[in-house]
Image: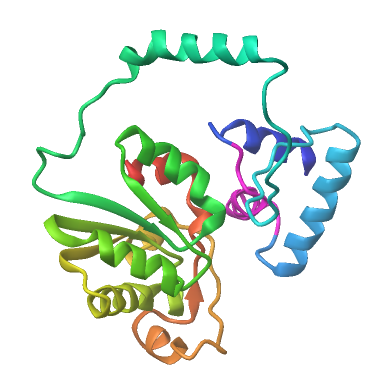
Amino acid sequence: IIPRVRDIIGSYSYRPTLRQVFYRLVAALLIPNTEVTYKSLSRATVLAREQQIIDPLCFDDRVRTSSGGDYGWSNPDNFAQEQLATLRESPQFYTRYMWESQEVLPIIWLEKDALFTPVNSIAEDYRIRTYAARGYSSFTAVYEAALRINGYKPVKVLQLTDFDPSGEDMVRDLQTRLQRYGAVNFEIEKIALTHEQVATLGLPPMPAKTSDPRYDRFAASYGDNAVELDALPPDEFERIVR
């Protein structure tokens, strides 16, 4: 399976998560869509990376991060030279606000922190702010966003979530909480994953969690299969976000 993993990794323009590669293998009918299989794939890819069969840094892992470290200059002359070089180059960095003359300001709201890198790389091209969470967003994130959505101009929140009981409820939850904390003149549109996208693209399903308190309402509307956002092929994922 590792040669196919290497091919799939090569099809991305960024470092994918292991979960994204897993769903590509499931979609190709090479492995079953089970958590046991996912863990087996994780162990196999760790071994392959340890043995340098695939790039040890081929996967993006935003769950485990590091920060800090030494910084500074070796001597005062180096510091002065760097500051002078920055000053000489500063005119090329001047730019006008891109969205100042537009009628609506978009914001991207992402359920999955693990997919922040590919989403934000696209959003940065258009200077759009991206909020990323792990499931339902924290009070801090929603409150901060509400302060920004202050009526200066209309805001459109483009939301991306899993297609599952919680994911389908997150539009309502975000709408309610933004309004509660003072946001005005905005609307939310879920751009992925939708029921239509799941059906059209033939994405690999998995059983929805019956323990989710929103399961019954979801199952009554869509059945008991769920699909994760990670299952989107990279080209389709990029097309939707752009």
User: Residue 174 or 115: which is nearer the viewer?
Assistant: 174
Task: Identify the residue at image location x=29%, y=36%.
Answer: 126
| 21 relative to 220 in the view: left or right | right
Q: Position of residue 188 (x, y in %)?
A: 24, 65
Q: Which residues are magenta?
A: 15-31
Q: Above or below — where is 21 with respect to 179?
A: above
User: Residue 22 or 124: which is nearer the viewer?
Assistant: 124
| 125 relative to 189 in the view: left or right | right
Specify whether residue 64 is painted magenta. no
Q: Position of residue 171 (x, y in %)?
A: 31, 72
User: Residue 6 or 158: which is nearer the viewer?
Assistant: 158
Task: Identify the residue at image location x=84%, y=54%.
Answer: 43
Display colour scheme: rainbow
| 17 relative to 104 in the view: left or right | right
Task: Identify the residue at image location x=34%, y=33%.
Answer: 125
Q: Position of residue 178 (x, y in %)?
A: 27, 73
Q: Quadrant of residue 170?
A: bottom left
Q: Position of residue 128 (x, y in %)?
A: 31, 44
How many numbered discs?
0
Residue placed furthest toward the front: 76
Q: Above or below — where is 141 with respect to 26?
A: below
| 88 relative to 53 in the view: left or right | left
User: Residue 78 or 231: which is nearer the viewer?
Assistant: 78
Quadrant in which the C terminus is drawn? top left
Quadrant in which the N terminus is drawn? top right
